[in-house]
Amino acid sequence: MINFNYETEFEISDEEAYVDWLSNVIVSEKKSQGDINYIFCDDGYLLEINQQYLDHDTLTDIISFDYSVGNELHGDIFISIERVAENAADFGVSFDEELKRVLVHGVLHYCGYKDKSEADERLMRQKEEEKMLLFHVEQ
């Protein structure tokens, strides 16, 4: 089950569409969905997690804790809405597009994709783009 939790004023407007999309991404990677919790927060909240659990003293847009067992994906994904908004402006994309990129980024980590080396980062970006195309909202 995919759950959205809010530690900030932000809320996703059509949670069901996002859950359906993320579920389809998981299936497209031949994985099964366990419990995945998204926690939307601000920079301060995520910085505290970064310092406490990862010993990093930097702002970031996403931190994911992977509790997957085999091909069944489980985890907690923390997302700073402030970072998403700033990154969207920096990259010249809409907030919604950048939010989708970060949402799928966490799931792709659980699927085994990394982003530490240049080659890994290129593959991660390619997968993000590919999976973002799977998002559909009924108009």
Image: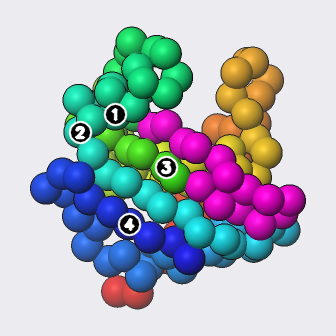
How far apart, in angstroms, are the residues tagged by discs 1 and 4? 16 Å
How far apart, in angstroms, are the residues tagged by discs 1 and 3? 11 Å
Task: Give the residue at x 33% y 26%.
Answer: 47
- Report whether residue 136 is seen: yes
Residue contact between numbered discs 1 and 2, judged by CB atoms under 8 Å:
yes
Task: Give the residue at x 46% y 15%.
Answer: 56
- Report whether residue 128 is seen: no
Other-residue count near label 1 (Cα within 10 Å), few / some / many at <14 / 14–19 / ≥20: many
Horizontal side of residue 32 vs 49, given as left or right: right
Q: Earlier in the sequence, mark 3 or mark 4?
A: 4
Q: Circle 3 is placed at which residue position?
A: 77
x and y percentages locating residue 1 in the rendered image: 56, 77
Identity, as a three-letter code, of the amino acid under mark 3:
Ile
Q: Circle 1 is placed at which residue position?
A: 46
Other-residue count near label 2 (Cα within 10 Å), few / some / many at <14 / 14–19 / ≥20: many
Depth check, front residue: 12 or 53: 53
Element under disc 4: strand
Q: Does the magenta-highlighted stretch encompass residue 7?
A: no
Q: Circle 2 is placed at which residue position?
A: 42
Residue contact between numbered discs 3 and 2, judged by CB atoms under 8 Å:
no
Q: Residue furthest top?
A: 57
Q: Is residue 49 above or below residue 56?
A: below
Q: Main secondary structure of the magenta part?
A: strand
x and y percentages locating residue 3 in the rendered image: 44, 70
Q: Quadrant of residue 20?
A: bottom right
Q: Which residues are magenta?
A: 62-75
Q: Is residue 29 above or below residue 32?
A: above
x and y percentages locating residue 55 in the rendered image: 49, 16
Q: Circle 4 is placed at which residue position?
A: 4
